[in-house]
Amino acid sequence: RGLVEKMMADVLRLMPNIKRFHLGGDEALTFGTHPDTKQYVTKHGKGALYLHHVEPLLNKLAKRNIRPMLWHDMMRDWESSDFQRLARKADLVVWGYSGHPYAMQKHCNREMIERFAEHKIVMWGGTAYKGADGMEADVPNIARREENALGWVEVAERHGFKGVIATAWSRYCTSGCQNEPIDGALDSAFNVGVILHDGKPPLAGIEACRKVLGRIGEGRAVKTGNILAKMSAARNNAWHGIRALRHLMVTIKQDRRRLPAFWMARHLKNVRDEIMRVEGTANDLRKALGGLMEPVWVERYIAERLQSLRGEFAALEAETRQLSPAAYGALFDNRMTKSK
């Protein structure tokens, strides 16, 4: 808690006149599992333990007339008495980025939202315009982002939410790889913003958003998004080929009468071609993000996508050559020779 208090103090020094403070406090997956805290939870409940940790922070902000915002997933199975304590001191951001908020199973559902409402908790919705379509995704899935935002608009209106927040995630966690650079996702940001403002997407769809970005001098973002989409397609094709080749190799090893199995070399060639496409888009991405991101992060982003593919290709090439020299030589050596 001391660390969080220092972080709060840093923020308040920079922004002393704010009215709301985002504390978050979500996804503490091991919260209450230590033997000492487990005894406390058994006696008092999960909500009591959470409030024991967080309530002093809420009180500090209340003294400055600042309303804290906490995220809902830690409160899903609290007792009514804990909800009553919370409602007096903090707003709740009810979040979820896949599908309709009523249909997120145990994470978020209608019954849960109605229970928060019954306890007079002030609620916000949490959607995402990027960073919610895969840990290593390159671009947001526009249709999924739109569907989710529309769902939150509906729920917010029905339950009298204070508002809906459009979040953006560039890593799923500190130990995860980078995903979906903001510089290639402004079309989705614009689209979700329109939905949250108007309750519906632009009449002309995502292309209308891209045209507006061009008119306001953000056409570079559209080009960056296109580059990332091409990179994503080539990566997916490469991994599809790797999977197909792995399966085929098992078939060959189980029954070597199927040799020379020219499809092995054909899959390998396709994987190599797709990796070359990823390399081409990587060069385009360096240019597109030049001056927008520190070069080290661009290079790490590219490395996260290319090194694993190259490693797979090297291993598969060696195994194909060993399993079926005839297939490898007939289809692949020519390609390798010509490319040199």
Image (spheres, rainbow, N blue to C red):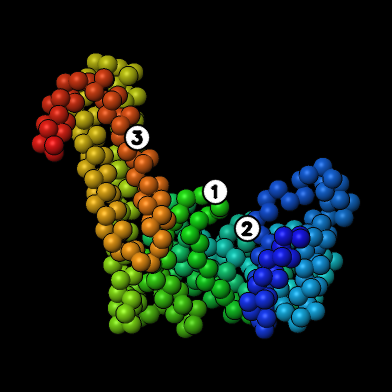
Label 1 or label 2, whichever comes before in sequence order: 2
In which quadrant will I find the N terminus?
A: bottom right
Residue tagged by mark 1?
Answer: 175
Residue closest to the eye, 174 or 190 = 174
In the depicted structure, whether residue 96 falls above or below residue 175: below
Query: Is residue 310 shown above or below 210?
Result: above
Marks 2 and 3 sit apart, C-alpha to C-alpha, by 36 Å
Viewer-side label of 1, 3: 1
Q: Residue 329, relative to residue 178: is it above or below?
A: above
**Residue at screen point 64% across, 79% down:** 15
Q: Nearer the viewer, mark 1 or mark 2?
A: 1
Mark 2 lies on a secondary structure that is loop
x 79%, y 73%: residue = 60
Question: Which residue is disc 3 drawn over?
Answer: 312
Establish if 284 lies above or below 176.
Answer: below
Which structural element holds mark 1? loop
Q: Which residue is labeled 2 in the image?
A: 107
Residue 23, picture quadrant? bottom right
Residue type at mark 2: give it.
His
The disc, 2 or 3, on the residue closer to the chain's N-terminal end is: 2
